[in-house]
Image (tube, helix red, strand yellow):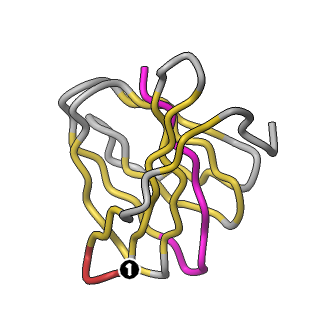
């Protein structure tokens, strides 16, 4: 889905890593939450508080998932899932966008 319908968007951005990762929180009509974000080139480590599905909207991410030793590539149109309370790493060589759905 390229459009989110009937949403509320937080005015204040979530800014991480000195502005190299920025997202906006979106609340859908059913009260579920997602974030839409942009990641500048670099390598970043994140922690989850709840389960997430990360969809790559544009660009490409290399992701080091919890418990893995090899980086996996996720290109535009693909996604990966994360359990609650885990740490994972993302790196990208280009400006990339994502949509994070909380589960």
**62 with respect to 67 (left or right):** right
Quadrant assignment for the N terminus: top right
Q: How many marks?
A: 1
> Principal SS element in the magenta part?
strand
Which picture quadrant has residue 52?
Answer: top left
Residue beneath the point at 28% across and 26% down: 50
The span shown in magenta is 92-103
The local secondary structure at tag 1 comes to: loop
> Within 10 angstroms of label 1, few (less than 14), some, or many (20 or more) residues?
some
Quadrant assignment for the C terminus: top left
* Residue 32 falls within the magenta-colored stretch: no
- From the viewer's side, name the closer residue of 46 and 28: 28
Q: Which residue is mark 1?
A: 20
Whole-percent x and y of residue 59? 68, 67
Residue beneath the point at 76% across and 46% down: 77
- From the viewer's side, name the closer residue of 33 and 90: 33
């Amino acid at each position: 889905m390229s459009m989110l319908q009937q949403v509320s968007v937080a005015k204040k951005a979530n800014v991480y890593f000195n502005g190299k990762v920025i997202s906006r929180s979106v609340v859908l009509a059913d009260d579920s939450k997602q974030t839409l974000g942009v990641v500048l080139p670099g390598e970043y480590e994140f922690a989850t508080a709840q389960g997430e599905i990360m969809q790559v909207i544009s660009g490409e991410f290399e992701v080091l998932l919890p418990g893995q030793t090899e980086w996996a590539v996720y290109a535009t149109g693909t996604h990966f899932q994360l359990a609650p309370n885990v740490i994972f790493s993302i790196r990208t060589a280009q400006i990339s966008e994502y949509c994070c759905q909380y589960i």
